[in-house]
């Protein structure tokens, strides 16, 4: 099987449509439920981790600020059939579960067990809606979707009949334990746009480990929410193979000052070229950034709450945060910095016996 050149592809990308291009390398868009009739709708095509069909038993969402919720109030989360006029719910819950006021914690992952489970085919268009169905005067809370700079076509988020600048931040859980998301959306329970360190930090070399599910070549790295905390500063970027066992340095890069935009007040996307490398499946590759001065480095970080949830996301459970002072890297499988490769060539798929590549959605990446 030959490697065919391709225009630049970023792998893997998390954080919704805008992924690393959003403010700080991804973030939340919050929608407020403050009257009894307010309903948040998150709509998209279901993509299960294994691209199969499953029966959904639980829905995971993320709360924002909870200003007030009465002790008798009920927050309902579940599926609605689509409206005939727009990609939002039609106002009637079909399969749902209820949370009491005690269950609704601010800035947290909320898990709802459906009273009646729902069969969902891979690729099916579906809508998860949220409403305070037992409303107490003064109730006011927010539900987070993934931030987006404008209103997308699909997937899409509606507050009542108004489309919002966000994409779904919903995790579906099947009764057999398989996870899924809405294609083009994502699921993260927290975001740290201020993950920062310098050369005096106890673990100053930080980055990600990841695997590629296909033979490919890469000729760059990207970082989302990257910036230095001053107009000047210096970093060393490294690429490793076998980073979780016996790290072997493939490349060490010291970017020139004219390859970094010295704008300390703004986090941004960064792309850095590297000597083209061939990557193969089954290897834990690493990308790290290490400051060489006491100027802080920022990289956006997504918090996924539970390591297994990543099976439904771009890069799967092999894409995770690493860091070290020296010796072996420590691993946090519940988080990932917004770092990845720029792919320059892929298998052309002409040989027999090879698996077909499948795309898990606009959230980024491919799976073999």
Image: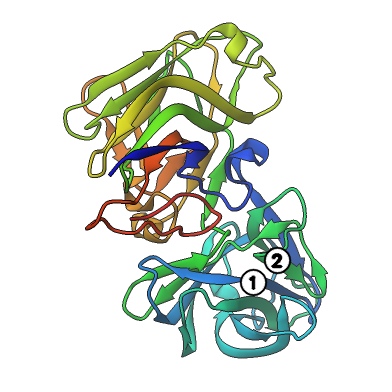
- Kindly identify which residue carries mark 1: 43
Q: Earlier in the sequence, mark 1 or mark 2?
A: 1
Horizontally, residue 49 falls left or right of residue 112, namely: left
Q: Quadrant of residue 226?
A: top right
Q: Which residue is nearer to you in this view: 178 or 124? A: 124
Residue 134 in view (yes/no): no
Mark 1: secondary structure: strand
Pointer 1 with pointer 2, Cβ within 8 A: yes
Q: Give the label on residue 157, or none.
A: 2
Quadrant in which the C terminus is drawn? bottom left
The colour scheme used here is rainbow
Residue at 43 percent across and 55 percent down: it is 305
Residue at 52 percent across and 55 percent down: it is 189
* Label 1 crowd (10 A; few <14 / some 14-19 / many >=20): many
* Above-or-below relation of 51 to 119: above
Residue 261 in view (yes/no): yes
Measured Cα–Cα span from mark 1 to mark 2: 6 Å
Horizontally, residue 208 falls left or right of residue 104, namely: left
> Residue 182 placed where, x, y %?
55, 66
* Above-or-below relation of 303 to 245: below
Q: How many marks?
A: 2
Q: Give the label on residue 60, or none.
A: none
Considering every residue shown, the one lying at the far left of the view is 246
Mark 2: secondary structure: strand
> Residue 215 placed where, x, y %?
30, 41
* Above-or-below relation of 183 to 363: below
């Amino acid at each position: 099987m030959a490697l065919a050149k391709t225009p630049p592809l970023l792998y893997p990308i998390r954080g919704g449509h805008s992924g690393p291009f959003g403010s700080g390398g991804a973030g939340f868009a919050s929608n407020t439920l403050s009257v009894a009739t307010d309903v948040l709708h998150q709509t998209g095509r279901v993509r299960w981790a294994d691209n199969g069909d499953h029966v959904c038993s639980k829905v995971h969402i993320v709360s924002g600020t909870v200003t007030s919720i009465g002790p008798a109030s009920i927050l309902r989360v579940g599926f609605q059939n689509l409206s005939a006029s727009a990609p939002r719910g039609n106002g009637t819950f079909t399969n749902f579960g209820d949370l009491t006021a005690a269950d609704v914690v601010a800035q947290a992952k909320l898990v709802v067990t459906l009273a009646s489970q729902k069969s969902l085919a891979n690729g099916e268009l579906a809508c998860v809606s949220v409403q305070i169905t037992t409303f107490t005067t003064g109730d006011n809370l927010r539900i987070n979707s993934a931030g987006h700079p404008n209103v997308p076509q699909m997937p899409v988020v509606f507050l009542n009949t108004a489309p919002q600048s966000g994409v779904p931040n919903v995790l579906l859980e099947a009764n057999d334990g398989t996870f899924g998301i809405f294609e083009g959306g994502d699921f993260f329970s927290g975001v740290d746009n201020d993950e920062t360190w310098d050369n005096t930090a106890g673990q100053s070399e930080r980055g990600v480990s990841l695997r590629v599910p296909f033979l490919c070549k890469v000729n760059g790295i990207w970082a989302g929410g990257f910036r230095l905390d001053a107009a000047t500063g210096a970093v060393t970027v490294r690429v490793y193979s076998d980073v979780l066992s016996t790290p072997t340095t493939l490349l060490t890069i010291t970017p020139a000052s004219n390859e970094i935009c010295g704008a300390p007040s703004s986090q941004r996307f960064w792309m850095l070229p590297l000597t083209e490398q061939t990557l193969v499946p089954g290897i834990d590759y690493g990308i790290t950034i290490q400051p060489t001065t006491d100027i802080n480095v920022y990289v956006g970080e997504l918090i996924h709450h539970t390591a297994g949830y990543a099976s439904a996301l771009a890069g799967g459970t092999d894409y995770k945060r690493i860091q070290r002072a020296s010796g072996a890297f420590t691993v946090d499988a519940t988080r990932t910095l917004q770092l990845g490769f720029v792919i320059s060539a892929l298998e052309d798929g002409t040989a027999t016996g090879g698996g077909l590549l499948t795309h898990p959605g606009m959230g980024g990446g491919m799976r073999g």
